[in-house]
Image (spheres, helix red, strand yellow):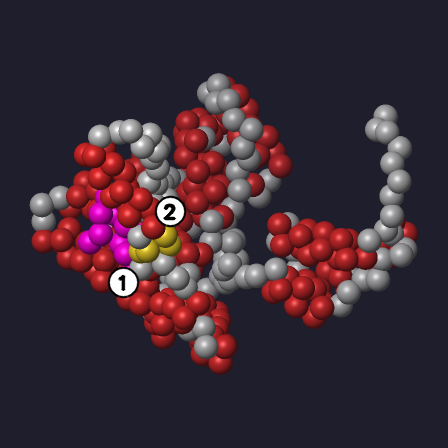
Amino acid sequence: MPPLVNWRFDQDKTREALCHMLVVDELPFKLVEHSGFRHFLSVACPMFAIPSRRTITKDIFNYMVFSITVDNASSNDGAIAYLKKKFDNWGQNILGGRYVHMRCMAHIVNLVVQDGLKGKDEHEAISRIRGAIRYIRNSPARYKKFQECVEFEKLETKKFLSLDVPTRWNSTYLMLETAISLKRAFDAYEDVDLAYKNDLLRQPFDGIPTDYDWERAKVLMARKMKEKYDKYWGSIERINMILYYAVILDPRHKLEFLEFTFDKLYGGTEKCDVMKEQVRDGLHELFNDYKLRYGHSLQGTPGSPGSSFSRVSSSSSSSVGTSMQFLDHEATRTFTIEQEFSMYKTGGKGIA
């Protein structure tokens, strides 16, 4: 049993915890207006004044927004236009909002999957597999017989046959994933249900899934998806450059690491040199924008980063004394912010 402690209600901390719950659990802000939720809190914590949905929204925005995710391209475009306008009004639109637009990942993944299902070969193969699943699921007796085939084939799985639905783009993948793992059971079912084959022959795509259909469902669908993936993400030139700058500003990596990865991917090619140049130019553009905005409040830092030394006695030789004088000079030397930036990105190896 935990020890007894004095507890005092804190409206602000409770409100902050509510915001945290809504964000990490991806709950709608309107939850605070649901009658069931309000009743629960009135019993569990009657002293808490439940804020409105608008107040909660403002609270969460005040905790600083890192990213906003939407689920389709049109929503993404609308959100970007709104944010750019706001940033302009606040005087915070860096480089005219060049890097605000990140491709909508959920929408692209959706396009990748849907494109993989549209090919004629894939469509016919998937339709036959879908028809077989629908036939078995339409009757409890058929489904029981199919489960017996699963046991007979010694297929150790807890998955159940499912059909895809238009409102969930990943449901077709889940349907095929389960069906492919149970292929041997489908083959066995053909021998125990004589109506199975005849009934499916009357369907639009004629008959039960063939071995070729099962292979097409795996191979051709993946190939089409890879083509669509490459269209959006298959080349480093298509990636938002802000992701490269994030790597450079990570003290574990910096510019050398990024250029090393470019060399590994495209070493010795013109593309590699072009990408390095684009990253350097873009990084300096960002720095110059930063300097224009905040340069008046920035000052150089005394001393070379990472420099350290021990003093020697006054009885040391003149050559040692000269060396110490030089180190003293370096320790008091002021580096400009441009020099500091150059030294940082190169790992402190010199000013470029």
Q: Position of residue 48 (x, y in %)?
A: 85, 57
Quarter of the image with the N terminus is top right
Marks 1 and 2 in Cβ contact (< 8 Å): no
Identify whether 173 is placed above or below 340.
above
Name the disc covering residue 250, or none. Answer: 2
Query: Is 170 in front, or is 45?
Result: 45
Q: Position of residue 282 (x, y in %)?
A: 26, 63
Residue 339 within the magenta-colored segment of the rendering: yes
* Amino acid type at image mark 2: Asp
Q: Residue at x 47, y 53 (%)?
A: 169
Q: Residue at x 47, y 36 (%)?
A: 178
What stretch of residues is rendered in magenta? 338-352
**What secondary structure is found at the residue carrying circle 1?**
helix
Circle 1 residue = 284
Q: Residue at x 32, y 63 (%)?
A: 287
Classify mark 1: residues with Cα within 10 Å, few (<14), some (14-19) or many (20+).
some
Q: Residue at x 23, y 58 (%)?
A: 280
**Alpha-carbon span between mark 1 and mark 2:** 16 Å
Identify whether 104 is placed above or below 303.
below
User: Which of the 4 image quadrants contains residue 179?
Assistant: top left
Quarter of the image with the C terminus is bottom left
* Amino acid type at image mark 1: His
**What secondary structure is found at the residue carrying circle 2?**
loop
